[in-house]
Amino acid sequence: MEKKLFGTDGVRGVANIEPMTTEMAMQLGRAAAFVFKQDKDRRHRVVIGKDTRLSGYMIENALVAGICSMGVDVLLVGPLPTPGIAFITTSMRADAGVVISASHNPYQDNGIKFFSHDGFKLPDELELEIEDLILNNRLDDLRPVADDVGKAYRIDDAIGRYIVYLKNTFPRDLDLQGLRIVLDCAHGAGYKVAPAVLEELGAEVIPLGVKPNGVNINDGCGSLHPEVMAAKVREFRADLGIALDGDADRVIFVDEHGMEVDGDHIMAICGTELLKEGQLHKKTVVATVMSNMGLDIAMQQAGGKVVRTAVGDRYVVEEMLKGGYNLGGEQSGHMIFFDHITTGDGILAALQVLAIIQRRNKPLSELSRVMTSLPQVLVNVRVRKKAALADIAPIKKVIDEVEGELAGKGRVLVRYSGTEPLLRVMIEGEDQLRIAELADNVASAVREHLGA
């Protein structure tokens, strides 16, 4: 069945426009409460947290109303990173967690995503069940009354609990003394937690993006705009820069020279380090099809390998669970360290990299040389329909010829956009000019036979 409300990461859209209205938020709250309320003989609890968007207030109140109306209690934690809400959910033995955030999107957007009691995002079948309850009005006659309705409580020390948890993921024999770090929190959910963690571990922190006003989240700052952080690193002669996105579940670095270090390089740094320590499960890192082939080469040279998934951190997590792996992530900066947490965590990932810097006594620029990115070309082609490429012989022929020429020294990725009528042609290889020609060859064949 095709989902109508949920996308790859919850329900998302412009706040106050379908599906991100207060009416839909209340319905989502009611349906989720019904799904998670399995044992009728005890009180159930759902954690709700959010980022710093102006629309978070109205959506939070609508969710609370919906959940309480189904006889489930609510634990409110306020602005907290997405992984922090997953942590609080499991720590407090709650039945579920809800995050109100549109991650790296602009402030006018918002979203609702759910964690189950074990801190993992919901599987497709549960999201479909929630949709069915809403779209088919199956909850209309289910209304607890009297003392069976839910209550709402505020958890005032959630930030402190999460700070302690994060610090405990950092090696006890190390600290961050002597490091000057530029930290850009994107005026988002990590604006209190991240500076506190780094400072309490001994770093000198130069904070950016720590004054949210409801409308400045991700606005010219954070992981989407690492050039801001890079300029400050050079200005203050800092050792490195760390940039989070709006809900702090992803991280991008710059080294001491202000050069960007993306998620692929972070996976290479952490993957090879875990390999040396004998702690990388099955000697494997899980990445998506968008990660650069340089990551595969770096891991192979270190004695490991890369397993690839579809784009989206939920698919990375699914593969990690299925294969028993403990490190995965995306080029965009989602890093998942299963030894510590169940979902992407930008602050936790930053701490793992900082521990390697301190342990090895090497700057980030030197550590990042463990991986060399292959040149990459991306061409988008507008299409009139999303047909199976294997069924269109002329297109398949061109793709096969390109794959034959690259033969282990590069790769071709051709995939449709999930949200637009586009076919994305991505080619990696050793020669920038040649792969640009090859990408144009594929794109031309697509335009000829599928072009809009």
Image (spheres, helix red, strand yellow):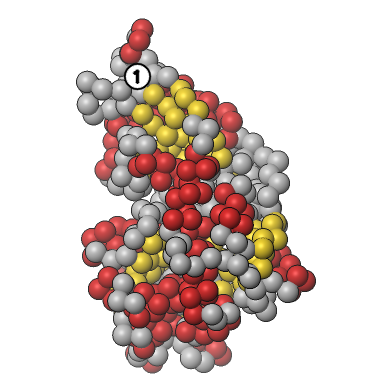
x and y percent of residue 136 in the render? 32, 27
User: Across the whole image, how many numbered discs are drawn on residues?
Assistant: 1
- Going by the numbered disc 1, the residue's amino acid type is Gly
> Position of 66 compared to 108: left or right?
left
Q: Using the image, determine if residue 22 lies above or below residue 308.
A: above
x and y percent of residue 401 in the render? 36, 88
For the N terminus, the image quarter is top left
The answer to whether one can see residue 264 in this image is no
Residue count near mark 1 (Cα–Cα under 10 Å), binned few <14, some 14–19, many ≥20: many
> Position of 131 compared to 267: left or right?
left
Residue closest to the eye, 286 or 106: 286
Most extreme residue toward the right is 235
| Label 1 SS | loop
User: At 62% from the left edge and 54% from the top edge, which residue is drawn?
Assistant: 195
* Residue position marked by numbered label 1 in the rendering: 71
User: At 32% from the left edge and 26% from the top edge, which residue is drawn?
Assistant: 44
> Position of 270 compared to 35: left or right?
right
User: At 60% from the left edge and 35% from the top edge, which residue is drawn?
Assistant: 55
x and y percent of residue 216 in the render? 69, 47
x and y percent of residue 14 in the render? 58, 40
Residue closest to the eye, 19 or 343: 343
Snapshot quadrant of residue 413: bottom left
Residue closest to the eye, 413 or 39: 39
Q: Using the image, determine if residue 447 lies above or below residue 365.
A: above
The answer to whether one can see residue 294 in this image is yes
User: At 62% from the left edge and 75% from the top edge, which residue is drawn?
Assistant: 255
Most extreme residue toward the front is 173
